[in-house]
């Protein structure tokens, strides 16, 4: 018997990481005849769907509940486990043969009481695939619930299930199993089976199975047949990278040793490591270590995200890696220049537009920190400006505002191409001046619709209605100018 079958949960208590559902189900079993429910089980990704549906079916029918779990030995439990009862019907809506039959099956047969079980159970897997007429038939049936008929619907795409159905079911969202819970589950299995393992090997398995317990157990089974479960064997068998390899590559990127990075990538490919899996693993690694170096890892995660999304278009995946990593580092160099600019501009701005009405606390602080002659100058400015510009723009963090605006724009092309290529220079009254340094950025911001959205978002940021003006400056000229300023 395979490990996946052996460790398939037979009771609620054996379902790992789903306590939020199990607690409710067990409570319901305490008054299972008084309360009637149809169920809609939602999984982010297919795992143990029929097993879970079957567990509920067994619990609703079991003659000898054990701590509100199905007993698995009474005649009803066995009928369901062996699928030998006419009262227990499993339908896979994804298989087309059922789509036409399901209407008759549901309408005609569900009106008869169960023959052997306490409750007649219909499990409809991938319910979102039903046709409209099938959904109507289903709706009619569950609108007039009978205590001895129960529908257990399962789906991976709940947004495709009509609201009318959802509102008549108790919905259970199953959680993706987190890595640490998965690792401890796998450890439990290894100990039970006397398998030799290392924790890091189990970690790799947990990561690549992405929360799917069945897959994880299957991998343990496959590797352990031939070898010990250590990092090297797991990575060799499953074509995945081990952590040190990922760490090493990220370090090379940090040091920007391009030749070594590129030859490392070739090595990785020649080792038979699946590069698309490798990109995903790197993202997980980054996510785990994000707080250790937020700026660096955020940039890397964007880069690896790009790699994952472009990989399917590239016949030679290693090239996709090289291009994206190269872009990451050249962008990074630009950004260093770029970052120094808004700072300079802001300071400049500070002096120009500080207004005493807002200044008191914050204004004084910045004045104090400047050298005395400058602060005198500034005070003059302040006095001069105080009557004309009662604005608070000196305190705005333009780069931060700009990244929020792009975020809320929620338009990937614009986000991608305006991020470092459009820079807020200043705000004069209700006009925000933006410099664009590529033709594409210019085009994007001149587009009426985009412009309107940007202006609306900026108005929210500045708490007043603002409009934008854009000036195009060639990238090279822009940076050259800023460098020499
Ligand atoms: Zn039982």
Image (tube, grey):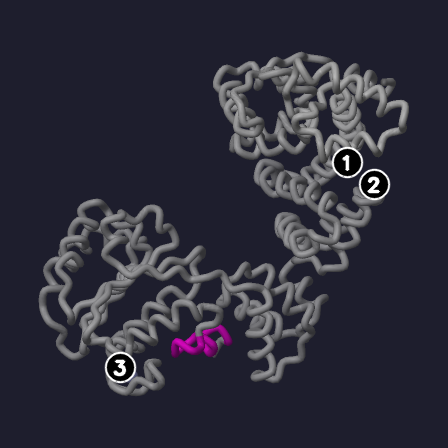
Q: Which residue: 35% across, 47% down?
A: 159
Residue picked out by circle 1: 329
How far from the left and from the top, in percent, is residue 371?
A: 89, 28
- Which quadrant would the C terminus be assigned to in this image? top right
Whether the residue carrying mark 3 lies under 8 Å from ligand 1 is answered with: yes
Tag 2, which secondary structure? loop
Say whether residue 386 is left or right of residue 451: right
Using the image, tell me which numbered label, if any, was put on residue 256: 2
Q: Earlier in the sequence, mark 3 or mark 1?
A: 3
Q: Which residue: 65% across, 29% down?
A: 419
Q: Are marks 2 and 3 in contact (CB under 8 Å)?
A: no
Q: Nearer the viewer, residue 359 or 327?
A: 359
Q: CA distance from mark 3 to mark 1?
A: 62 Å
How far from the left and from the top, in percent, is residue 392?
A: 65, 25
How far from the left and from the top, in percent, is residue 107?
A: 12, 58
Tag 1, which secondary structure? helix
Q: Which residue: 23% across, 75% down?
A: 32
Q: Earlier in the sequence, mark 1 or mark 2?
A: 2
Q: Which residue: 75% across, 20% down?
A: 382
Does residue 424 sit above or below 323 in this rendering?
Answer: above
Using the image, tell me which numbered label, if any, was put on residue 62: 3
Query: For the magenta stretch, what is the residue range?
Result: 3-14
Q: Are marks 1 and 2 in contact (CB under 8 Å)?
A: yes
- How many other residues sit within 10 Å of disc 2, few (<14), some (14-19) or many (≥20)? some
Can see residue 393?
Answer: yes
Say whether residue 389 is left or right of residue 138: right
């Amino acid at each position: 018997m395979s490990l996946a079958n052996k460790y398939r949960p037979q009771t609620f208590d054996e379902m790992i990481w789903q306590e939020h559902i199990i607690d409710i189900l067990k409570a319901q079993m305490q008054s299972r005849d008084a309360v009637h429910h149809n169920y809609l089980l939602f999984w982010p990704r297919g795992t143990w769907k029929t097993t879970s549906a079957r567990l509920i079916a067994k619990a609703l029918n079991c003659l000898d509940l054990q701590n509100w779990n199905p007993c698995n030995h009474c005649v009803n439990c066995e009928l369901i486990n062996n699928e030998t009862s006419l009262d227990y019907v499993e339908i896979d809506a994804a298989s087309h043969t059922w789509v036409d039959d399901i209407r008759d099956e549901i309408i005609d047969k569900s009106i008869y009481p169960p023959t052997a079980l306490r409750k007649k159970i219909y499990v409809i897997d991938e319910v979102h695939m039903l046709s409209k007429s099938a959904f109507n038939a289903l709706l009619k049936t569950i609108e007039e619930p009978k205590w001895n008929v129960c529908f257990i619907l399962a789906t991976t795409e709940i947004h495709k299930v009509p609201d009318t159905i959802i509102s008549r079911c108790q919905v259970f969202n199953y959680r993706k199993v987190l890595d640490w819970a998965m690792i401890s589950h796998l450890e439990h299995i290894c100990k039970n089976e006397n398998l030799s393992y290392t924790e890091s090997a189990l970690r790799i398995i947990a990561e690549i199975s992405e929360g799917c317990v069945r897959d994880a157990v299957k991998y343990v089974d496959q590797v352990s047949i031939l070898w010990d479960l250590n990092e090297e064997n797991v990575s060799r068998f499953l074509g995945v990278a081990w952590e040190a390899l990922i760490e090493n590559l990220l370090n090379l990127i940090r040091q920007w040793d391009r030749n070594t990075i590129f030859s490392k990538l070739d090595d990785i490919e020649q080792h038979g490591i699946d590069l698309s899996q490798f990109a995903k693993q790197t993202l997980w690694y980054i996510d785990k270590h994000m707080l250790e170096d937020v700026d660096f890892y955020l940039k890397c995660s964007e880069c690896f995200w790009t790699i994952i999304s472009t990989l399917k278009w590239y016949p030679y995946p290693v090239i996709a890696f090289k291009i994206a990593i190269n872009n990451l580092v050249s962008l990074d160099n630009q950004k260093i220049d770029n970052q120094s600019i808004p700072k300079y501009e802001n300071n400049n701005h500070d002096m120009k537009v500080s207004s005493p009405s807002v200044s008191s606390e914050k204004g004084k602080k910045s004045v104090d920190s400047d050298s005395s002659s400058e602060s005198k100058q500034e005070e003059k400015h302040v006095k001069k400006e105080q009557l004309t510009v009662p604005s608070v723009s000196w305190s705005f963090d333009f780069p931060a505002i700009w990244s929020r605006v792009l975020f809320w724009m929620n338009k990937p092309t614009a986000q991608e191409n305006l991020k470092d290529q459009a820079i807020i220079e200043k705000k004069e009254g209700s006009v925000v001046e933006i410099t664009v340094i590529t033709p594409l950025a210019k085009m994007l911001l001149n587009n009426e619709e985009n412009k309107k959205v940007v202006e609306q978002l900026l108005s929210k940021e500045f708490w007043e209605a603002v409009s934008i003006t854009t000036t195009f400056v060639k990238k090279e000229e822009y940076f050259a100018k800023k460098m020499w300023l």
